[in-house]
Image (cartoon, rainbow, N blue to C red):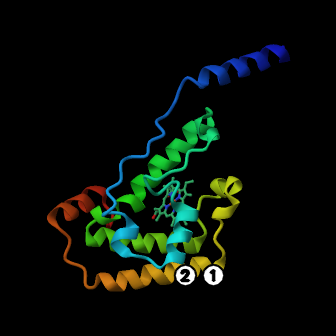
Amino acid sequence: MLKRAALVIVAALVVGQAIRPNRTNPPVDPTQTLAATLHPPATIMANLDRGCRDCHSSDTAWPWYTSVSPLSWWIVHHVDEGRREVSFSEWGTLDVRRQFKKLGDICEQVEKGDMPIESYLLIHREARLDDEERRQICDWTKSEQTKLGPLPPPSPEELSRRGRQGRPD
Ligand code: HEC
């Protein structure tokens, strides 16, 4: 009985390998990246790269285990979702209001310790950020917010989007 259960599991794992989610790295317009548009200090950029790039850019490293099902399904989902939230590769395509909002979100996530995601840190010990590095990221996001200056009023599209979603920004 146990042997049979083991066989079923092995068979499921083998068959599962055929289901390959798309591990994409979409093309990057080098003029639109966060690095090219905000020119963050080198240490900030290095820490964002180290802690966030795999999920928040089109420049994801895909080591061998990211192609092993079912782990791959879960990892690809994280990357897709992460990119949707904010992509450092497409920063310049965000309007000023979105940039302002995302800078605040980055600080908040880092300050709360919600990002980088805990499961990612299990494998990527080097991605861990210490208190000082978190503080530096927040100081930087705040200074970038100040640089963006007074925000333009929300566009009609923005207002209708908010109305639909029933939440600000
Ligand atoms: C392993 C993948 C992964 C890593 C690494 C990662 N993120 Fe995320 N991030 C996600 C996913 C998935 C979401 C969407 C779901 C969620 O909010 O938990 C997200 C959401 C976010 C959001 C939007 C959340 C909100 O509700 O405002 C921000 C901002 C963010 N991440 C910033 C960062 C920063 C900054 C780093 C690096 C210090 C980082 N993330 C590292 C996967 C990741």
Q: Quadrant of the N terminus?
A: top right
Identity of the residue furthest to the right in this view? 2
The answer, for residue 115, to whether it is visible in the render is no
Identity of the residue furthest to the left in this view? 156
Amino acid type, residue under disc 2 in the picture: Gln
Along the viewing direction, whichever of 159 and 69 lies nearer the viewer: 69
Q: Residue at x 39, y 67 (%)?
A: 34
The answer, for residue 153, to whether it is visible in the render is yes
Mark 2, residues whose alpha carbon is within 10 Å: few (<14), some, or many (≥20)?
some
Q: Against 140, is 156 above or below? A: above
| Residue designated by label 2 | 136
Residue 147 % position (x, y): 33, 85
Along the viewing direction, whichever of 54 and 134 lies nearer the viewer: 54
- Circle 2 — which element? helix
- Circle 1 — which element? helix
Q: Against 70, is 45 above or below? A: below
Mark 2 touching mark 1, by CB under 8 A? yes
Residue 59 % position (x, y): 46, 53
Q: Against 14, is 83 above or below? A: below
Q: Residue at x 43, y 52 (%)?
A: 58
Task: Give the quarter of the image for residue 98.
Answer: bottom left
Mark 1, residues whose alpha carbon is within 10 Å: few (<14), some, or many (≥20)?
few
Residue 7 % position (x, y): 76, 16
Decide if residue 80 is on the left or right side of residue 169. right
Task: Give the quarter of the image for residue 90.
Answer: bottom left
Decide if residue 57 is on the left or right side of residue 12. left
| Residue designated by label 1 | 132
Residue 5 % position (x, y): 78, 18
